[in-house]
Image: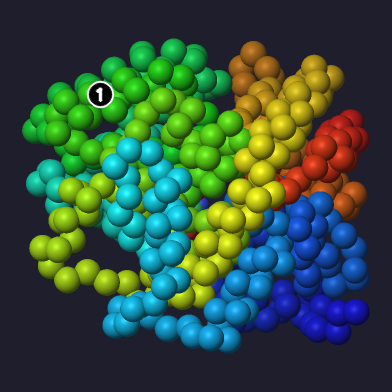
Amino acid sequence: PYTGPTAEEILKKRKEFLSPSMFYFYKKPVNIVHGKMQYLFDEHGRRYLDALGGIATVCCGHCHPDVVKAIVNQTNNLQHSTILYLNHSIADFAEALASKLPGDLKVVFFTNSGTEANELAMMMARLYTGCHDIISLRNAYHGNAAGTMGATAQSNWKFNVVQSGIHHAVNPDPYRGQFGSDGEKYAKDVQDLIQYGTCGHVAAFISEAIQGVGGIVELASGYLPAVYTSIRKVGGLCIADEVQSGFARTGSHFWGFEAHGVVPDIVTMAKGIGNGIPLGAVVTTPKIAEVLTRRSYFNTFGGNPVCTAAGLAVLRVIEREKLQDNAHFVGSYLKERLNALKDKHEIIGDVRGRGLMLGVELVTDRQLKTPVKVEILQVMEQMKEMGVLIGKGGFYGNVFRITPPLCFTREDADFLVDVMDYAIAKL
Ligand code: PMP
């Protein structure tokens, strides 16, 4: 049994010693002391179904034994920076990772986070093209350092950084966007931004395939192929931010961009890549990668032996346990059940997403799509009381985010939907 500090004691220390910016969703946050696959356990031994852990990186399942073993073995053997010496761990993982990407995408740079990966990707695009302008989407989240905060386009996550050379395009949002699910119509706005907002050339276009923080918004179909063509016509590179939608999460494909039939020039990833270990990566072509040889470039912990050993173990688990197929089958079933729930509850305005990256948007009026305010927190709190932890996001904070570890089962899906059904009915 757990004998450590209680939730109240931890809260007190947080208040005194940690940044006041740290937040939590629940009125009474849970003190999680143990994790096992798709379950989390609190200080009293209560079990919760984790329907959110995927966002916070866990893709194979909490404390997956193979990943833990790889980390422990490597830690016992060597943990160091990879700047100065050779070590097989970084090379083996880079090779395995490159094999998961299409075309000429085979040069890997390791980082410690998604923010770092996107900062590097944007810098490389600027160096490669000699241009400064970058187009990203409204409602995007790409990180919280200076450059990536500029590319992020939701006021909730932006501080007063100098936003240089970033243009935010109309979001191809099938639910709230003005052109519905007609991707090509939204793509015209990117052409307009290039024409009227730049010198006619750009460094890059960056986007998620499914916006995560933005509330599980799947880009309208036809959008990415049209935009990639426009961007390449003016010499720009196309960057796919796969921090959330990558690593088998969408089920139908290993990478989110694949569902759109495009091949990016640079792909960035983090979160699920290390099953909870701080790890990110940028993958690009040999030609683009050359730009970093103009000066010296390094990252002290990027690609260290422990993190890359974890990454390799994650890839093997995804393959051996067929987690991509599982994300597809369980995710499709879960989406079907959520859609049935939408027929039952007026408050559900939209159900969307792919695989085990699903969103449920709550509105007070289906016609006007008025976002709910407090109800979502009430439902979350009630679901927590019944043993299900779920996420929340979207610009208005009114979208449930369902991104569980990829080992989620049909029974878990049933439990989640039944609990959500009961919690909504109690409103
Ligand atoms: N890109 C996307 C799509 C993300 O969701 C996030 C994190 N929410 C990031 C980048 C930044 O990753 P990190 O928090 O690891 O810096």
Q: Is residue 6 left or right of residue 136?
A: right
Which scheme is used to colour this image of the protein? Answer: rainbow
* In front of the other: 371 or 182: 182
Q: Looking at the rendering, in which quadrant would you find the C terminus?
A: top right
Q: Is residue 192 left or right of residue 302?
A: left
State the residue position of label 1: 229
Task: Answer above or below: position of 243 versus 262.
Answer: below
In this rendering, the count of numbered labels is 1
* In front of the other: 213 or 79: 79
Q: Looking at the rendering, in which quadrant would you find the N terminus?
A: bottom right
Q: Which amino acid does label 1 sit on?
A: Thr
- Residue pictured at 78% horizontal, 70% vertical: 34
**Is residue 386 in sight in this rendering?**
yes
* In front of the other: 221 or 392: 221
Q: Is residue 120 left or right of residue 33?
A: left
- Residue pictured at 66% horizontal, 33% vertical: 328
* In front of the other: 46 or 261: 261
- Residue pictured at 16% horizontal, 56% vertical: 290
- Residue pictured at 49% horizontal, 39% vertical: 255
Callout 1: helix, strand or loop? helix
**Which image quadrant for residue 65?**
bottom right
Residue 136 horizontal/vertical position (percent): 33, 38
Q: In this view, does 186 lie to the left or right of 320?
A: left
Task: Answer above or below: position of 42 versus 381.
Answer: below
Task: Answer above or below: position of 421 versus 195.
Answer: below
